[in-house]
Image: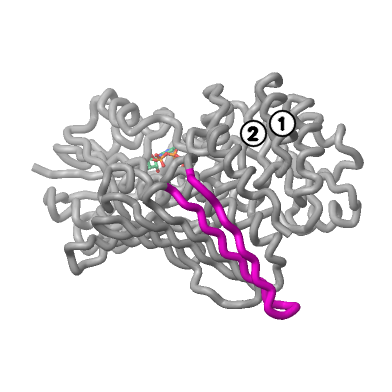
């Protein structure tokens, strides 16, 4: 019996998929089809897949050509499948020409011509509404939005506005955004999402204007440190039926959701202490406080909840250049310490110490792609990771699109409760 294998995502199953399966089957007596698993697709940056794995498998099955369907879960699985299933022929579309030549060492390799004029990408683009985004900026830095947005289909960055026209021009040149708007109202025309990328003092004003024009908003955190203004924004968002998304990328990474699950499931026992530290150069402690403490708090408040007992902040300014802030949040049986330094070097990390073990996130924990689990009764360290490039903005964008399309208005890991407590904690730093 001659065995043939082929692989694909098979999203939005179309004629091209049907044809390749049909032709692949003709190369032998038994066809195995590998369908990509969801985490494998996310890991390799295919974030736009619409159909679930079960739907994609079902569509391959319904084509009637597959004798066996397997799930492709990791890079490099193909060689092990060829050996495991004793495969004779490997078939793939010629869009991959040259990429699989090494397979010829293990079995016969066939590249088949693609069916012209159709692809999953094309179907997704014509079927689903495109979301257009406008940016309001006060500095020439997009936080990687533009490059990350390119990895999510159905989303395009179209316009920029700044009160300083020189900044708007420089921004548009740097990130290749052709529409520089002269005023806010023009920015709002034809976009449905607005990213407010400004200093704290201007956020409330811009966010409010965007919401009033029925735009979904991504805002830097905190939106405002005035509780009344913060409440007003949420109230307005409710009235105008739009999403207010905090730019807290960590909450959208698989690594964070995974470690949260482990902690809630009791894998490290009771949490005794959380230690968080980071430092940067030439960024005032105030800026660092808002930028990094918000991410640290988002992690802490999801793990510990919002019922803390007391909070203490201490700022040390040793010389004109060095600033250091230490914040302690006390819960009934847990102490949380957040240390931030300007112009000194502290090891950047978050360590969550529990009665049965610890979890550690290292350098750049606010966009972590890995963490370590150190069980108390074992010598070995377990590492969990999810490779991705960029700063993780694409995961936030993807979640935002799902929320908009499915009419959800609150991201569960950043609910009003967490937001209110975070705003309170972020008040009063001088
Ligand atoms: N394929 C084909 N003809 C097409 C589209 C896909 O022969 N018009 C083949 C691919 O070459 C591959 C298999 O179908 O061998 C599965 O492809 P997949 O990547 O799932 O489909 P695409 O339509 O190429 O998806 P995307 O646009 O997301 O890349």
Please provide percent x and percent y for residue 412. 48, 33
Task: Report the image quarter containing ligand 1.
Answer: top left
Residue 319 falls within the magenta-colored stretch: yes
Position of 127 with respect to 22 (left or right) is right
Q: Quadrant of residue 278?
A: bottom right
Say above or below: 101 vs 249.
below
Question: Where is the C terminus found, in terms of image quarters?
Answer: bottom right
What residue sits right under mark 1 in the picture?
Answer: 233
User: Mark 1, mark 2: which one is toward the viewer?
Assistant: 1
Quick one: label 1, few (<14), some, or many (20+) residues within 10 Å?
Answer: many
Say above or below: 87 vs 193.
below
Q: Residue furthest top?
A: 239
Question: Where is the N terminus found, in terms of image quarters?
Answer: top left
Q: Nearer the viewer, residue 288 or 402?
A: 288
Q: Quadrant of residue 28?
A: top left
What residue sits right under mark 2 in the picture?
Answer: 244
- Tell me, for residue 119, which label it has, or none: none
Q: Is residue 94 visible?
A: no
Q: Residue at x 57, y 32 (%)?
A: 416
Q: Nearer the viewer, residue 324 or 211?
A: 324
Please provide percent x and percent y for residue 410. 55, 29
What main secondary structure does the magenta stretch of the protein show? strand
Q: Residue at x 70, y 37 (%)?
A: 227
Please provide percent x and percent y for residue 40. 35, 47
Q: Give SS at disc 2.
A: strand
**Circle 1/circle 2 CB separation < 8 Å:** yes
- Magenta residues span 308-331
Q: Is residue 306 visible?
A: yes
């Amino acid at each position: 019996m001659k065995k043939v294998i082929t692989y694909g995502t098979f999203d939005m199953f179309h004629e091209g998929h049907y044809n390749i399966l049909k032709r692949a089957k003709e190369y032998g007596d038994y066809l195995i089809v590998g369908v990509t698993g969801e985490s494998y697709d996310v890991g390799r940056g295919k974030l736009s897949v619409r159909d679930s794995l079960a739907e994609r498998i079902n569509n391959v099955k319904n084509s009637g050509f597959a004798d066996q369907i397997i799930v492709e879960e990791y890079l490099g699985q193909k060689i092990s499948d060829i050996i495991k299933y004793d495969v004779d022929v490997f078939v793939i579309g010629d869009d991959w020409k040259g990429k699989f030549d090494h397979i010829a060492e293990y079995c016969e390799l066939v590249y088949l011509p693609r069916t012209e004029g159709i692809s999953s990408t094309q179907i997704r683009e014509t079927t689903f509404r495109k979301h257009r985004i406008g940016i309001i900026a006060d500095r020439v830095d997009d936080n990687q939005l533009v490059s990350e947005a390119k990895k999510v289909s159905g989303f395009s960055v179209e316009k920029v506005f700044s009160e300083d026209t020189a900044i708007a021009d420089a921004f548009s040149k740097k990130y290749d955004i052709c529409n520089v708007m002269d005023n806010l109202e023009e920015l709002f025309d034809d976009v449905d999402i607005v990213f407010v990328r400004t200093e704290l003092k201007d956020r409330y004003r811009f966010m409010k204007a965007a919401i009033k024009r029925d735009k979904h908003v991504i805002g830097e955190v905190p939106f405002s440190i005035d509780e009344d203004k913060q409440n007003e924004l949420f109230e307005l968002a409710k009235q105008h039926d739009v999403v207010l998304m905090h730019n807290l990328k960590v909450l959208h990474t698989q690594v964070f959701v995974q470690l949260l699950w482990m902690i809630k499931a009791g894998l490290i026992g009771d949490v005794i202490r959380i230690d968080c530290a980071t430092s940067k150069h030439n960024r005032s402690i105030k800026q660092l406080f808002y930028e990094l403490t918000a991410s640290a708090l988002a992690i802490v408040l999801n793990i510990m909840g919002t019922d803390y007992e007391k909070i203490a902040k201490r700022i040390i300014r040793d010389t004109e250049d060095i600033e250091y802030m230490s914040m302690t949040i006390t819960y009934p049986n847990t102490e949380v310490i957040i240390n931030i330094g300007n112009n000194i070097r502290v090891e950047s990390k978050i360590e969550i110490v529990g009665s049965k073990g610890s979890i550690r996130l290292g350098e750049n924990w606010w966009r972590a792609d890995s963490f370590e689990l150190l069980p108390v009764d074992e010598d070995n360290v377990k590492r969990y990771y999810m490779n991705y490039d960029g700063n993780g903005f694409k995961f936030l964008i993807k979640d935002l699109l799902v929320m908009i399309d499915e009419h959800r208005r609150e991201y569960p890991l950043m609910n009003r409760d967490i937001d209110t407590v975070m705003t309170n904690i972020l008040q009063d730093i001088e």
